[in-house]
Image (cartoon, rainbow, N blue to C red):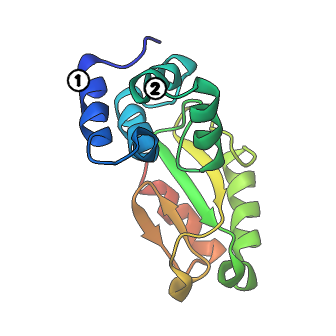
């Protein structure tokens, strides 16, 4: 994997110019980089660091703190199951257990066909429909285990 394109580097420079301190643009710069590369490979992280004039280790540390940044390829559809209080009290563990069995993966893993990656998410800001999950940008909830097959089939 090569690093960032000149267009992505320029987009990060434009973003950085809108802040008093270049490092304030880091989160947005990481999104620009991930959008282009798909994953924050070490070469991509190094390029973001170079453009923002920051140590690569600092860029990697910040990126690794947030669950929205990816360091390895994911499936075509990212499934995120909310595990926050409302979802936990309303049965998210049963949803997670069923999905792990059905997909044959653990949390953070991708199915062998590359179709799905399964993750737990601390909060997806949808307590009113707990338990809930997102498949890509699509929200599903309140969930019952019986619904999961139908939902997964939509992403075949």
Rendered image: mark on residue 88? none
Q: Residues within 10 Å of mark 1 (few under 14, many from 20)?
A: few
- The CA span between labels 2 and 1 is 18 Å
Q: Nearer the viewer, residue 72 or 103?
A: 72
Q: Residues within 10 Å of mark 2 (few under 14, many from 20)?
A: few
Q: Which residue is mark 1?
A: 7
Most extreme residue toward the front is 20
Give me the residue at 51% from left, 79% from top: 126
Give me the residue at 58% from left, 25% from top: 56
Q: Nearer the viewer, residue 3 or 47?
A: 47
Q: Position of residue 79 (x, y in %)?
A: 55, 54
- Pointer 2 or 1: first along the chain: 1
Q: Nearer the viewer, residue 73 or 95?
A: 73
Q: Position of residue 136 (x, y in %)?
A: 43, 54
Q: Nearer the viewer, mark 2 or mark 1?
A: 2
Q: Secondary structure at mark 2?
A: loop
Q: Secondary structure at mark 1?
A: helix
Quarter of the view holding residue 90: bottom right
Q: Position of residue 118 (x, y in %)?
A: 63, 50
**45 to 129, vertically: above or below:** above
Q: Nearer the viewer, residue 2 or 29?
A: 29
**130 to 53, vertically: above or below:** below
Q: Is residue 19 left or right of 64 when viewed as pictured?
A: left
Quarter of the view holding residue 52: top left
Give me the residue at 62% from left, 33% from top: 58
Q: Which residue is mark 2?
A: 53
Give me the residue at 68% from left, 40% from top: 109
**34 to 5, vertically: above or below:** below
Q: Is residue 90 left or right of 150 when viewed as pictured?
A: right
């Amino acid at each position: 994997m090569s690093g960032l394109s000149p267009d992505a580097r320029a987009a990060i420079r434009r973003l950085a110019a809108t802040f008093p301190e270049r490092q304030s643009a880091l989160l947005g710069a990481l999104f620009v980089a991930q959008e282009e590369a798909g994953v924050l490979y070490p070469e991509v992280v190094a390029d973001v660091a170079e453009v923002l004039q920051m140590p690569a280790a600092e860029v990697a540390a910040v990126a690794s703190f947030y669950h929205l940044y990816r360091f390895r390829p994911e499936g075509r559809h990212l499934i995120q199951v909310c595990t926050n209080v409302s979802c936990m009290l309303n049965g998210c563990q049963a949803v997670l257990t069923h999905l792990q069995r059905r997909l044959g993966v653990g949390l953070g893993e991708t199915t062998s066909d590359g179709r799905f990656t399964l993750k737990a998410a601390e909060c997806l800001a949808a307590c009113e429909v707990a338990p809930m999950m997102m498949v890509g940008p699509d929200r599903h909830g309140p969930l019952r285990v019986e619904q999961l097959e139908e939902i997964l089939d939509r992403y075949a």
